[in-house]
Amino acid sequence: MSKYRLRGRGRVDSSKPVVFTFDGKPYTGLKGDTVASALLAHGVHLMGRSFKYHRPRGAIAAGSEEPNALIGTRRGPGRFEPNTRATVQEIWEGLETTSQNKFPSLKWDVGAVNDAAYMMFSAGFYYKTFMWPRSFWDKVYEPFIRAAAGLGVSPTEEDPDTYASRYSYCDLLIVGAGPAGIAAAREAAGKGLSVILVDENPEMGGTLLSEPQSKINGKAAWNWLEDELAALQAAGVKLMTRTTAIGYYHENLIALVEKLTDHLPTLPEDTPRERMWRVRAKQVVLAQGALEKPMVFHGNDRPGVMLAGSAQTFLNRYGVKVGNTPAVVTSHDSAWYAAFDLQDAGAFVQAIIDTRAQVRQDLQDEARARGIPVKLSHTVTATGGRLRVNNVRVNPVSGGTNVGAGQWIKCDALLMSGGWTPSLHLFSHTKGSLTWDDDLTTFLPKDTPEDCVITGASRGLWGVEAALRDGAARVGEALAKLGIGSSASEYSVEDDRTGSGVMMRELPTDRSPGKAKAFVDFQNDVTAKDLRLAVREGMRSIEHVKRYTTNGMATDQGKMSNINGLNIAADALGKKQPQVGLTTFRPPYTPTTFGAFAGYHRGEHFEVVRKTQIDAWAEEHGAVYEPVGQWRRARYFPKAGETMDQAVTRECAATRASVGIFDASTLGKIEVVGPDAAEFINRMYTNPFLKLAPGKCRYGLLLGDDGFIRDDGVIARVEEDRFHVTTTTGGAARVLNMMEDYLQTEWPDLNVWLTSTTEQWSTVALNGPNAAKLLAPFVEGIELTEEAFPHMSCVNCTVAGYPARLWRVSFTGEIGFEVNVPAPYGRDLWEKLWEAGQQYDITPYGTETMHVLRAEKGYIIVGQDTDGTVTPADAGMDWAVGKKKADFVGMRGLARPDLVAPNRKQLVGLLTEDNSWLEEGAQIVFDPKQPIPMKMVGHVTSSYNQGTTGRPIALALVEGGHSKMGETVYIPMPDRTIAAKITGTVFFDPENSRLKI
Amino acid sequence: MIQIHCPYCGETLPELEFAYAGEAHIERPLSPSEQSDEQWAEFLFLRENVKGPHFERWRHLHGCGRFFNAVRNTITDRFYITYKAGEPRPDLATLLEEDK
Ligand SMILES: [Zn+2]
């Protein structure tokens, strides 16, 4: 049995030893232990090093609020997690744990040199180093901060665990299963309601687990607890342990994280590690209890210095004495009980040091009866001991501030209590308002906009009986809103421990407060001195003080530091606490794994990948893909050993020489149908559509009402009242949304239906001189001749036996067809054309070749050659704007003064003088000799090196470009400046001679 | 997550099904060409940016697809009312009174 373990005491199982390791050394604990309680049972207090100063630290608390004892836990490959609180992690046979922030070892740490340089790293350190001296940043500060910043180390392997995600709905959700939460659940149980009671701990009971001495309605506390939980279970209340309510969101949506396997020695099959629940509750009861405040004095972070209530938890719940000769320093009655419990358990309490002059007589009498020395009106001014406290310096105080001579008292632990802070985190998530209570020197909950009540210690009620009665009463308000009457059950508690105390800032000291290392935020190493310095340096709001000092910004979210920090800042500012304000609590309540948030959305499920019916063929033929919106599209089809440039050059040449085949299925498609379909299209697009005959296609340009290009595509009038509209691949949803907006809200009188048909059609494009020859044998219903089926025609016919919408269109400058067949037939059609195309050396090409071929013809790609500030005139596309139309979307916008102003950026071609390739996005200047910063007059929008013109071509937006044909502009690059001549945008076959069959 | 009542579906559904669509009751002029530059600029660009109850449009994007109007408090995200497109702007004072 380990040295500090009390056999048979607590809720751990003495018959079940569990061996785990800490920094490689094996320790034996008991089933039910946390890593912290098991280490403390062996007298191990040193569990980690602090973040900034690398000071030795031990567990200060016993629960999820612990700021110091952060460890790494490992369970084989991939299952490493840093920053686990040793006070939460349950031990299991074989668990490997390691301390953090130490090198080379926890006991001898090189980084502790920071501690010696304490004066350098005070408040605002991060901000000051950002500013001065600049030259130090790269070589000194950044490497230092990078090495020192962050807690623990990130896992390097992929997480092999699964994380589940579930929704749940209930009438009543109760957060916190201490006395108040259990009493609330009991009131609601058996009334036909769905009730969920959650608690972050492995077992329910809250403070009762640490205070077994009380008797509730005549029953011993732990018997009462067992009976109550059984009764709740029997009444159908859903009890969830190891489940943390991490956030409270709009309209009673509460996020719960349920930990399922972290406590198990072997992982069960098919069980997720964690499950994120999104619970929509009709009513919520918050019963999260209160957190104990540390006291602020020099050396309050030494291992062995811990919260008195936590020492009581280690003793009563885990059967572990945190020391044999502890001392107690407090300003609150509750710590006296911790002293009594420890003394009764066989420890020798060296002193109870209370800052108050007056303390309840019954407490003093009990201390005297146990032989514990009591020092009222005393302060603590220092602690001693290298890696563990071994004495404490105690001084009398008179008149509040006069500190007398110090005296060292030996001790092996120092228990402190600065009183209690209601846990208001979730209440604050609801945007609930708080009110300052002068007597309790803390904030209390006031109003909340959500359907929620808060009860027990969370609203400043101390003691088991008060919590039970309040839980039973307050849940009545929630039940009444659910239409259920109730009368609160009665509770009477014997040996209840209630108490009161006073608020202290830093404890008074006879030493220089400027040299005191009196910690307020233990995890971020923020001292009282830092907070006062922040105020002296001009921080006035608590939000500024917080960011300047990082007080409350660590992973414990200021659970221990916020109120002490506020008290000290308020004192330094000479204001009352509510005038200084409390920083905002934000979810999550405790650190939460990325896995829990991601749930199923990982790997292939992270985002939808849309694939066409022809995608698999492309994969089989070695396509290299690129993402376009959510689609993956074949970018090029390299042959063995080909680079992208070589493949694209070959694909371009083959298409222009014979025939290329291209999967255009991702193009957005919208079916516009109804008696007013032509009128609608005519109003939406710049081009005239009223007179477009059925069987004809027309290019359409879509503007916003501001006059800027939004999208484009070919539109076919399939029938009198039916249009097949195409959009850019990425713009489909946006265009449909815009069309619906105008149709529903501006022109509800138009009788038109819009339907997305993008996924309904497979679209195979054939381009090249042999395209008609290849396709003709497959087509029934139309002759593919210049006369019967001229360029920009469409027809409903049969292709390869499939019903088809056949279009004669070209985005390459070659003879072109787009065959639309019902989506499932796409691959079969493609393969038939592929087979028959072998006689023409048919070549499949991807988006890269499509881009080159269109750029050679000066066809724009919306979103690449335009950026939301380009008009049709800027793009040289005035021809697409109907001049006789009464109105279309964007028509009035085109007349705006800025849009008709001279010197707008206009789309032009660029040919480099030295035949070099330009980088897309590169900036353009007129005069390369002007001083820096140069005036930039445009940028390269598209640039290709692989085309059929035998030289690199580029498109660019250039100020006044249309009137600068033949002039030279310059593109400064890091290594040189490239000169280029402004040209028209058509680089290939300007006469359009190749479109004729 | 907010829940929003779609006046067309008649159901209160999670925010995820909906898309915000800007300020409500901004009507596109019937004859844009007759608008002055100032009028057109106001129509295009000027919005209230209210802190508090705001008349705004939403679309039941992943449901019925309809655009509708709403009055939402931009501080608390509380929806006072949702109503069909084309229905008149409700009286704000009455709404706020009813909400008490
Ligand atoms: Zn709807």
Image: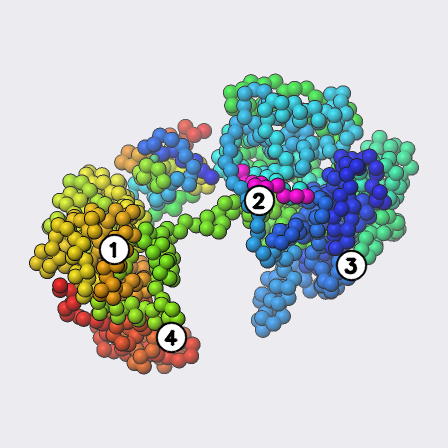
- Tell me, yes or no, whether the highlighted magenta stretch contains residue A274: yes
Whole-angstrom CA distance, mark 2 to mark 3, is 33 Å
**Would you name the residue on which mark 1 appears?**
A832
Is residue A442 visible in this depiction of the protein?
A: yes
Counting residues from the N terminus, which is met first, the one under dot 2 or under dot 3?
Answer: 3
Look at label 3 and name its amino acid.
Answer: Lys
- Residue placed most toward the observer, A214 or A241: A241
Q: Give the range drawn in magenta.
A: A265-277
Counting residues from the N terminus, which is met first, the one under dot 4 or under dot 3?
Answer: 3
Q: Quadrant of residue A54?
A: bottom right
Look at label 1 and name its amino acid.
Answer: Lys
Do dots 2 and 4 share one subunit?
Answer: yes
Q: Quadrant of residue A149?
A: bottom right
**Would you name the residue on which mark 4 appears?**
A934
Counting residues from the N terminus, which is met first, the one under dot 2 or under dot 1?
Answer: 2
Q: Residue A588 carries which label?
A: 2
**Would you name the residue on which mark 3 appears?**
A107
Do dots 3 and 1 share one subunit?
Answer: yes
Does any atom of ligand 1 lie closer than 8 Å to the CB of label 1? no
Q: Which chain carries label 4?
A: A
